[in-house]
Amino acid sequence: MKRKGLIIAGALFFSVLSSALFTSCAKDTLSYLDVKVLEEATHEPILGAFVRVDTQSGNIEAHEGVTDELGVFHTEFVAPAVVNITATQGARTARTTARLKEGTVVEAIAYMKSGK
């Protein structure tokens, strides 16, 4: 009886150990980007700005979307890259660039001048 308990305990230990080893070794290879679009004068977030993110080399498909109530557009790429960011709302445009890093969230801010 005691031996059966030791065998079960040993099997459980190795099961937990191997699970921890294999899950902790998984490397995050995605590159994450948060683009924040703000009013240049007030630094207030701009809701609903259209954002386009593309690589300078053109080797990765462009990502597009709109900013949320915090003025943020979030996207992820499968590889690190240098990207061009263009945000538009009506006739207003803001541009910036960012260098994406593997397994990291990079934050970029695009400032828009106030509308006339």
Image: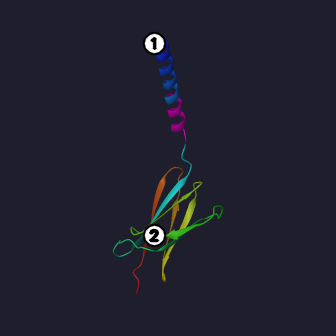
Q: Residue furthest left?
A: 42
Disc 1 residue type (three-letter):
Lys
Give 20 or 38, whichever is nearer the viewer. Answer: 20
Image position, residue 7 (x, y; %): 51, 18
Residue at 52% from the left image edge and 38% from the top image edge:
23
Look at the picture and state if 13 lies above or below 59.
Answer: above
In the image, is 40 to the left or to the right of 3? left
Q: Earlier in the sequence, mark 2 or mark 1?
A: 1
Image position, residue 114 (x, y; %): 39, 81
Picture quarter with the C terminus: bottom left
Q: Marks 1 and 2: in contact by CB < 8 Å?
A: no
Secondary structure, mark 2, is loop
Q: Residue furthest right?
A: 59
Image position, residue 36 (x, y; %): 43, 66
Residue at 47% from the left image edge and 57% from the top image edge:
106
Main SS of the magenta part reads: helix
Give 78 or 43, whichever is nearer the viewer. Answer: 78
Residue that label 2 marks? 67
- Mark number displayed over residue 60: none
Give 8 or 102, whichever is nearer the viewer. Answer: 8
Secondary structure, mark 1, is helix
Look at the picture and state if 70 lies above or below 16.
Answer: below
Residue at 35% from the left image edge and 72% from the top image edge:
44
What distance separates the C-alpha of mark 2 from that of mark 1? 62 Å
Residue at 45% from the left image edge and 12% from the top image edge:
2
- Mark number displayed over residue 2: 1
Disc 2 residue type (three-letter):
Thr
Look at the picture and state if 104 lies above or below 14.
Answer: below
Magenta extent: 17-26
Image position, residue 83 (x, y; %): 56, 63
Numbered marks: total: 2
